[in-house]
Amino acid sequence: MHGRAAHVRGLVLAAGAGRRMGGPKALVRRHPGEPTLVERAVSLLHAGGCSGITVVVGAAAEEVTAIVTALGRDVDVVTCPGWDEGMGASLRAGLTALTRSTHEGEGCVDAVLVTLVDLPDLTPEVIARVLDAPGHVDNDHSPHPDPDGHAVETPATTATSAPTSQELRATLRRAAYDGVPGHPALIGRDHWEQVIASATGDHGARHYFRTTPHELVECGDLATGRDVDTPEELDTSR
């Protein structure tokens, strides 16, 4: 178990129908007797350091909600009526709900760590690294990129103390796997309104990250970051 990141709530997008998978991915199990993917995602976020988790549900909402609510009081559910639109609707629903709420023991949520339910090789170490990472700026969107194309490192001292509430709210960071951006993504509260406005279709926050300076945290040594859409892809991830 990693240390808690105060005022950071995990947000699991688990609303899809999983048509190519043969059913909602949230309910899929990698092996018989193992937890469902939604249970696994919640456990990973908790073990990685999130202060509570919110799960966005849509397809098979009642069944997924029953599983999630049985996991404990630091886990809650947001239902996305327009889940069939894609990831963008789920992200909007989750951020909108968190904008309006506080959680026991947390007060106001300053940032969310967003992940997908269908990342079978995600680990708590990836979660912890994205939560705790020093600045490692995405040169494509950095206001001051290294002219030689190397990563821009912020001073090491930024990693030694917990960020203030103001710093956490301004954070925009995501995992990368061998340089390819992926999930999870840490989105500070200052960015939520614009993410909600730009999240459409199946793109989630992709457009906002493409147009806004943010940090990339390399995690390719810990996982692949690949999602799975079919039973065959799930088999090869085992």
Image (cartoon, rainbow, N blue to C red):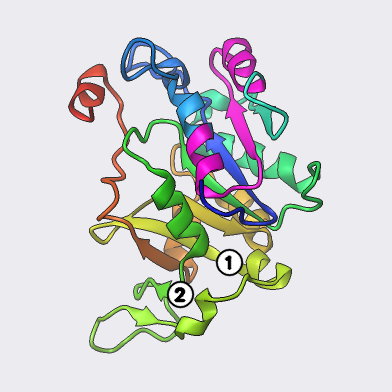
Residue at figure coordinates x 40%, y 73% from the top left: 136
- Structural crowding at the residue carrying mark 2, measured as other residues with C-alpha within 10 Å and reported as few (<14), some (14–19) or many (≥20): many
Range of magenta residues: 43-69
Q: Is residue 15 magenta?
A: no
Residue at figure coordinates x 81%, y 51% from the top left: 107
Cα distance in 3D space between marks 1 and 2:
10 Å
Q: Is residue 56 magenta?
A: yes
SS at badge 1: loop
User: x, y percentage for residue 12?
Assistant: 54, 36
Q: Nearer the viewer, residue 209 or 55?
A: 55
Res 209 label = none
- Amino acid type at image mark 2: Gly
SS at badge 2: loop
Picture layout, residue 61 above or below residue 214: above
Q: Left of 16 or right of it: where is 72? A: right
- List the residue tagged with mark 2: 135
Q: Nearer the viewer, residue 190 or 174?
A: 174
User: x, y percentage for residue 26?
Assistant: 47, 21
Residue at figure coordinates x 53%, y 46% from the top left: 114
Image quadrant in which you'd find residue 122: top left
- List the residue tagged with mark 1: 171
- Structural crowding at the residue carrying mark 1, measured as other residues with C-alpha within 10 Å and reported as few (<14), some (14–19) or many (≥20): many
User: x, y percentage for residue 196?
Assistant: 63, 48
User: x, y percentage for residue 101?
Assistant: 80, 43
Q: Left of 182 or right of it: where is 76? A: right
- Amino acid type at image mark 1: Thr
